[in-house]
Amino acid sequence: TDGRGIFRVYSPEMGNKIRRYHYLLEELRLAIASQNFQLSFQPIVHVEDCSIDYFEALTRWHHPIEGLIPPSEFIPIAEESNLILELGDWILLESCRQMSAWHNAGMKKVKISVNVSGIQLKHRPIYDWVLNALEKSGLPASSLMIEITESTLITASDEIIAQLERCRSAGVTIAIDDFGTGFSSLSTLADLPIDVIKIDKLFISQAKDNPKYYKILNSISELGAQLGLKIVAEGVEQLDQFELVKDMGICCVQGYLVSRPETSRNVGDKVLKGNVN
Ligand code: C2E
Ligand code: CA
Ligand code: CA
Ligand code: CA
């Protein structure tokens, strides 16, 4: 209230938020038109030998005045405005092209993983969309993975699930992202068209100090293993977290402990030196 018991619907702070939203929306439009984005790449490694299983493509927006604007700020705006469709087309094709180039430079076994949002699943015929990018880039389907959040997957229509099944049949890997935050029951996992579970970083950061999180983490990894799914622990920052997930039998980790997301140039240098294969 404003101190006189009257609700003020429009506070100056809200005004600032709305102004920033509209400002970023317009800037986003311009940036998309000029393809002013970069991809960064974060490795997901096997716990036993730290070899790279795949790279996750993460989109970066360096704004000329604002500097680096985090995806947590611009992706939601892109989704609400449907600009994610055009941006997402660029992200998928660019990710596939980059991985195809690295394959040709010698990095044959590593996959690329691309985040796909619910808006894209709704408005793009996902099977044709994915196959078109593979064809244009020359990347084999077996080298592409798509990450879809748990909350998006559990609310997806039968038609979308069927499209995802077709992608899988074509050889594309599908991961359920941020798992554990979407409140699906573990039993629904068996019915989803997925190959990989990415356990949300919340569980990794809490597992050591909070027995409840430890138990949830443990049952996700046990059930995942029984269903024949590959489990990835996200957000591993410390050695004791690495040891903990390793002891649980989780096969793969992603996190600052192993590597931050890197520019394509940095990754490319390592590929050429033969440090990645
Ligand atoms: P996400 O898909 O869960 O991606 C993982 C995020 O965790 C990335 O943040 C990554 O930099 C961060 N991360 C990796 N290791 C660690 C760690 O050890 N500790 C901590 N605290 N964080 C770690 P980023 O790049 O800022 O992206 C945030 C979110 O924005 C992503 O979460 C994803 O939901 C969205 N996003 C990013 N790029 C794209 C994209 O190309 N398309 C779509 N649809 N969403 C994207
Ligand atoms: Ca992801
Ligand atoms: Ca995630
Ligand atoms: Ca996330």
Image (spheres, rainbow, N blue to C red):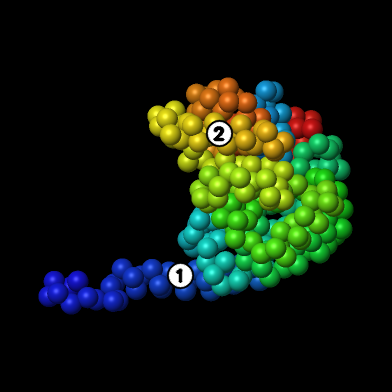
* Circle count: 2
Relative vertical location of residue 119 with respect to residue 251 in this rendering, above or below: below
**Most foreground residue, 204 or 27:** 204
Viewer-side residue, 162 vs 273: 162
Query: Which quarter of the rendering shows the N terminus?
Result: bottom left
In the rendered structure, the answer to whether residue 266 lies left or right of residue 206 reads right
Find the distance from the CA under tag 1 to the CA under tag 2: 40 Å
Indicate the secondary structure of the residue bearing disc 2. Answer: helix
- Which residue type does callout 1 highlight? Tyr
**Residue 259 visible to the viewer:** no
Residue 190 position, x and y percent, is 67, 45
Mark seen at residue 21: 1
Picture quarter containing residue 119?
Answer: bottom right
Of circles 1 and 2, the one toward us is 2
Of the residues shown, which amino acid type is indicated by label 2? Ser
Residue 138 seen in the figure: yes
